[in-house]
Image (cartoon, grey):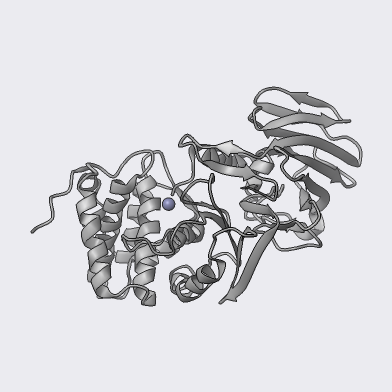
Amino acid sequence: MRLSLSVLLAALTLIASTMPLPAAAATPAHVAYYDAAYRATFKPGAQHAQVELKLSGDKLPSRLILRIDSKRYKNFRSEQPLEVSDKEVVWRPQGQQATLHYEFVVNHQRASGSYDSYSTDSWALFRGDKLVPSTRVTAARKLRSRTTLEFDLPKGWSAATPYPSAGEQRFRVEDPRRRFDAPAGWMLVGKLGVRSERIEHVNTIIAAPEGDNARRQDALAFINWNLPKLLDVFPDFPKRVLIVSAGDPMWRGGLSGPSSLFLHSDRPLISENRTSPLLHELVHVALGIRGDHESDWIVEGLAEFYSIQTLRRSGGIGQKRYDQAVDNLKKWAQRAPTLFGKSSTGATTARAVLVFQEVDTEIRGATGNAASLDDVARKLAAKRGEISLIELQEIAQQVAGKPLRSLQRERLTKPVAAPGP
Ligand SMILES: [Zn+2]
């Protein structure tokens, strides 16, 4: 599943708002830090969480602008100057300590009617980059945040986040590319069942509400077999990945986020069409790319290609079942007259998988099997961020040593021929 537009926009805003550090970043001697401590309080069954952001240090940022949806964030309060409108909150911290309070409405319904954020009497599931609205910070260049996220939870509750622990229910939020580190990715708090295991360099954590249908042990075993094959392609996979699951009324599919993903507890590890929703989302985590206005097919096609490929490489499916999966994709692909569009649906993604199969064959042919699509995918994962067809063509050409016929725009915009009998 691709990220929803709002999530995408939020992510883009987050990136735009927290300017990437230049290559020649100030040396540590010239860097000054202030503490940014987020504290989120959850009560069983409450529709909202109370969130506090406390800044402290010798020098603080002069201004924070939070982009908000007034339906999701309420009751902003601070003793420092604060302007609140429907779309934006402008906060001007003063002195050496400043505190901002607000309420975050946890429940959020997608257009389909299911939820991508939800709270009950015994758990709450949400994204960190929703708990905290996207924030643009104005501060001296040398000034950087040391961010933590702490949860104040009912007795018996715990928290699972993509971040390493820094004390009880407390996490260190680090993003070396930003001056202001803000929480991101999937998070689950409540009465939880958590299993974790180190698989090669990846600390893999699976969390679901206690008593939920999620098959944590099965999923962990499945990842144990498959993740090493994925790591062969993506050696820079995050050191920590959090997988959170819950049942209805949550979205009945998978959704990826930074170093984390959500998967509905009823989804099988391998579906009837020989694809794996869990592996699909893990590939999204590995790649960390998003399409430009017309190239979602690249993102979804690669996620699905490596979902099926990884199963084949790990022995999870044999050659015969792999061939059947490809035959299914061929039938399905005919329903996609072009690959380009804002979001890649089933038929478009099926067609995109076949394109990547051709790209793989073409690269192997051009290089005498010395290179493959894996090299392209690895370069994309190193680049991350937005991807267009032209960038994909360029990277593929670098790997193959020549332009690829399989990625010619004209071929990708024409309907595909019906498969032979
Ligand atoms: Zn997807």
Q: Quadrant of residue 242?
A: bottom right
Residue 362 visible in the shown view: no
Give the residue displayed 45% in from the left and 70% down from the top. 230
Vertical side of 360 occupied by 57: above or below: above
Q: Residue furthest front?
A: 211
Q: Position of residue 234 (x, y in %)?
A: 47, 67
Looking at the image, residue 143 lies above or below residue 280: above
**In the image, is 369 to the left or to the right of 44?**
left
Eyeballing the image, is 94 above or below 118? above
The image quarter in which residue 233 lies: bottom left
Q: Is residue 23 left or right of residue 375?
A: right
41 vs 287, left or right, is right
Q: Position of residue 93 (x, y in %)?
A: 84, 35
Q: Tag count in the figure?
A: 0
Is residue 249 visible in the rendered image? The answer is yes
Q: Quadrant of the C terminus?
A: bottom left
Q: Position of residue 196 (x, y in %)?
A: 62, 70
State the residue at coordinates (65%, 65%).
194
Q: State the image coordinates of residue 359 (x, y, percent, origin top left).
A: 27, 61
In this picture, residue 117 sits left or right of residue 114: right
Taking depth in this image into account, of 343 and 143 the one nearest to the observer is 343
Residue at position x 88%, y 35% in the image: 94
Query: In which quarter of the view is residue 108 placed?
Result: top right
